[in-house]
Amino acid sequence: PTPGQPGDFAFLEGHWRIRNLKRRSTGWDRFDGEARCISILGGIGSVEELLIPARDFSGMGLRMLDVEKRQWSDHWVNAKSGVLTTPGQFGSFEQGVGLFTSTYEDSGKLMHSMGIWDHIGPGQCRWRQVYSADGGQTWEHDWVMHWRRVG
């Protein structure tokens, strides 16, 4: 993987409107949200406050660069629990696309997940979450967020 650098998440700074697509058993649920993001500690950290009033949902994304390993970690805190997800997803940016992976167990089955930052450009980006239940042979989307900067 490409070594992470301070400022890799600088593209997220600002205020955003977000169009969410979340997979449900009955199809895709569509809803709006917003986020405020700041870079911290000279660009080795990024904090996101996500608000989705229509779903009574909020939380915080915390992304930190391990300066020695030059690897990013991406963690989530749901406002209802206040608990930081561990170990989080780890990764870096490869040719302008952020790839962050984790492995976890769900009902005794080994699962792989990946958060993907792409379509990064002036005033826009996209985040997708995919998972695999077969060791990474096939992947399914379960959440897609289309970000548009508003400030």
Image (spheres, helix red, strand yellow):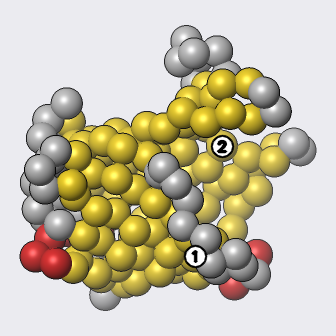
Give the image location of residue 29, x and y in percent: 76, 56
Q: Badge 2: few (under 14), some or many (20 or more) residues near its Cα, within 10 Å? A: some
**Residue 7 shows up from this direction:** yes
Classify 35 as above or below 102. Answer: below
Check disc 2 and give the amino acid type: Asp
Check disc 1 and give the amino acid type: Gly
For the residue pair 44 and 120, the one nearer the viewer reads as 44
- In this view, the residue farthest toward the front is 68
Q: Distance between the residues labelled 2 and 1?
A: 18 Å
Q: Residue at x 74, y 24 (%)?
A: 109
Per the image, the residue denoted by label 2 is 142
Per the image, the residue denoted by label 1 is 59
Q: Is mark 1 on a helix, strand or loop?
A: strand
Q: Left or right? Give the position of 90 relative to 8.
A: right
Quadrant assignment for the N terminus = top left
- In this view, the residue farthest toward the right is 26
